[in-house]
Image (spheres, grey):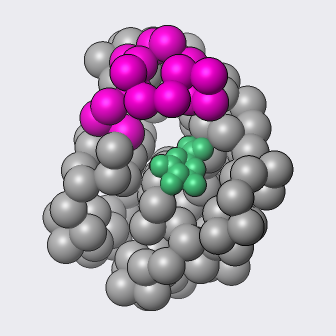
């Protein structure tokens, strides 16, 4: 099964952006790990990143049209993008898993990070586990698909 791992704004800066919060590994390493973890689970994983809200929304539409489960770190869009929330809702409405992932634990950080507009429309949310959260999310997708 094809699974898309979507990363929102500034996640192309992993490794140099606040390494105390997001770690020292970069997006290329995250991509390599997700593809390997997917392989273990029988999933064909494709990792994408964009700083452009319209592009990320388009990827949700494509996931619906192609019946592709989604793992998504919406990054800052998490906290304010109703456009992305509506698009993510279409994914779960189509009966497809959509796992929300955050590398950090946003609840333990700034007040504006405590609210997610994505969580209410996601299948589930994993926070605070670093890159390993993506592995947990891929395992959740594999579990949901097997059900
Ligand atoms: C993040 C948390 C968000 O609050 C932040 O805007 C990000 C990354 C995370 O992975 O911990 O860009 O989604």
Quarter the N terminus occupies: top left
Residue 89 counted in the magenta span: no
Q: Measuring 55% from the left and 72% from the top, which residue is drawn there?
A: 79
* x and y percentages locating residue 140 in the rendered image: 69, 43
Above or below, 62 against 32 in this view is below
* x and y percentages locating residue 15 in the rendered image: 41, 19
* x and y percentages locating residue 72 in the rendered image: 48, 52
Above or below, 33 against 91 in this view is above
Q: Measuring 23% from the left and 50% from the top, which residue is drawn there?
A: 50
Q: Does 33 sit left or right of 103 as displayed?
A: left
Q: Does 106 sit left or right of 47 as displayed?
A: right
Residue 96 seen in the current view: no
* x and y percentages locating residue 62 in the rendered image: 23, 66
Residue 55 seen in the current view: yes
In this figure, what is the number of numbered marks? 0
> Which of the 4 image quadrants contains residue 56?
bottom left
Q: Measuring 27% from the left and 43% from the top, which residue is drawn there?
A: 49
Question: Start and end of the magenta stretch?
Answer: 11-26
Above or below, 2 against 75 in this view is above
- Toward the viewer: 67 or 5? 5
Q: Measuring 29% from the left and 35% from the top, which residue is drawn there?
A: 12
> Which of the 4 image quadrants contains residue 21?
top right
Residue 16 counted in the magenta span: yes
As drawn, the residue found furthest toward the right would be: 108
């Amino acid at each position: 099964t094809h699974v898309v791992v979507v990363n929102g704004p500034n996640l192309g800066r992993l490794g140099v952006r606040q390494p105390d919060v997001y770690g020292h590994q970069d997006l290329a390493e995250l991509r390599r790990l997700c593809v390997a973890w997917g392989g273990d689970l029988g999933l064909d994983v494709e990792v994408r990143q964009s700083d452009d809200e319209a592009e990320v929304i388009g990827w949700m539409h494509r996931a619906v049209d192609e019946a592709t489960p989604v793992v998504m770190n919406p990054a800052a869009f998490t906290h304010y993008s109703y456009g992305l929330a509506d698009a993510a809702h279409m994914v779960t409405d189509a009966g497809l898993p959509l796992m929300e992932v955050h590398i950090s634990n946003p609840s333990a950080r700034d007040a504006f990070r405590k609210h997610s507009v994505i969580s209410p429309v996601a299948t589930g949310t994993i926070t605070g586990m670093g890159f390993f959260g993506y592995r947990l999310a891929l395992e959740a997708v594999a579990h949901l698909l097997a059900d």
